[in-house]
Amino acid sequence: MQRGKRSASYETSPNIALVKYWGVRDPARALPYNSSLSVTLDRLRTRTRVEFSAELDRDTLTLNGRPAAPAATAAVSALLDRVRNAARTTDRARVVSRNNFPTASGLASSASGFAALAGAATAAAGLRFSPQRLSQLARFGSGSACRSIFGGFVEWRAGRRPDGRDCYARPLYPARHWPQLVDVVALVAGAPEKSVRSAVAMQATITTSPEYARRLRELPRRLAGIRRAIGRRDAEALFPLVMEECDSFRLVCETTRPSLDYLTAASREVLAAVRALNAEAGRPVAAYTHDAGAHVHVFTLEREARRVRERLRAIAGVERTLLLHAGAGGRRV
Ligand code: DP6
């Protein structure tokens, strides 16, 4: 890498998993047990600038205008070390990152954050990584970050190889494939901040949940069904599978010892409201899903969005709703 100051900026969005990544088979290589599938969201963006400089004596991270906590800076440094190794430099970096949505709000800022960091840091270091290779780098920051390199509908293939060469994210369909699909996000009041990192919590699930093995057995069928339903834009096939997957994820969390409970009473009311909407319609008109957080994403079709939104807004404890679609992936800015 050349000397002096070299900088680059990269922007991308969080994603919501329809098939959840939960469990690491090789922590050193960040290889998951199962493949996962997500939708990269529009409107929510993270923009990160990385500047390498020989004059710095340590990495610094500014998050939304403020110096970041030491743990966050250390996680960023760890990913930068991989970039430095690849670029054969020891220069430290100044990282400035900004989200246009609340950080650590349960809106997957770590996914867009580490994807944006991987994109900006490699470009600043003069490395020309393919998107596939970028996704392989980003997952070392946060597993789900590997999917935020791409826009639209994205699959993270777990792969089988012990060296991880066949483990990467790839785009399935671009955002424009299904513009009628909407994600009504119910932001619940008092959503607690994550007390345990997902990367740690999921390993507790593997060792203590009696349900985990069954989940892994069921997943290939469910993933194939979800992939097929998206391909055909078949909401009535997709929605029950998305809820089944979310229920499976919640079950393995709840049966982890100590139990992992990410939801609030309001989140549970959102799940109940979606079940009620489907029962009233006599067919699946919406599907809920949530990650390791209290906010609930409700997928529905454009024509139902207003009704769904009104229903969710009526729940005490739902602070507000966002109307999102599938959006673009990462790009240099
Ligand atoms: C439930 O990728 O956020 O959102 O490495 O702790 O950042 P960390 O893990 P992370 O775990 C994501 C778990 C999930 C499911 C998913 O997004 O696939």
Image (cartoon, rainbow, N blue to C red):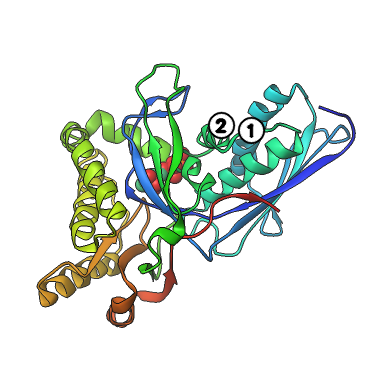
Element type where label 2 sits in the image: helix
Q: Residues within 10 Å of mark 2 (few under 14, many from 20)?
A: some
Q: Position of residue 72 (x, y in %)?
A: 60, 43
Element type where label 1 sits in the image: loop
Which residue is depicted at the point 71% across and 59% down?
65
Position of 55 with respect to 152 (left or right) is right
Residue 71 in sight here: yes
Given the image, on which type of amino acid does mark 2 rest? Answer: Arg
Quadrant hosting residue 307:
bottom left
Q: Nearer the viewer, residue 22 or 146?
A: 146
Does label 1 point to a residue whose CB lies under 8 Å from ligand 1? no
Does label 2 point to a residue whose CB lies under 8 Å from ligand 1? no
Circle 1 is placed at which residue position?
129
Q: Position of residue 134 (x, y in %)?
A: 58, 36
Where 204 sits versus 37, above or below? Answer: above
Quadrant of image for the N terminus = top right
Numbered mark located on residue 133 in the image: 2
Taking the image in four quarters, ligand 1 sits in the one at top left
Which residue is depicted at the point 90% across and 34% down?
4
Q: Are marks 1 and 2 in contact (CB under 8 Å)?
A: yes
Find the distance from the CA under tag 1 to the CA under tag 2. Answer: 6 Å
Residue 196 in sight here: no
Q: Residues within 10 Å of mark 1 (few under 14, many from 20)?
A: some
Position of 134 with respect to 197 (left or right) is right
Numbered mark located on residue 57 in the image: none
Q: Nearer the viewer, residue 324 or 129?
A: 129
Given the image, on which type of amino acid does mark 1 rest? Answer: Phe
Where 284 sits versus 146, above or below? Answer: below
Q: Position of residue 206 (x, y in %)?
A: 27, 31
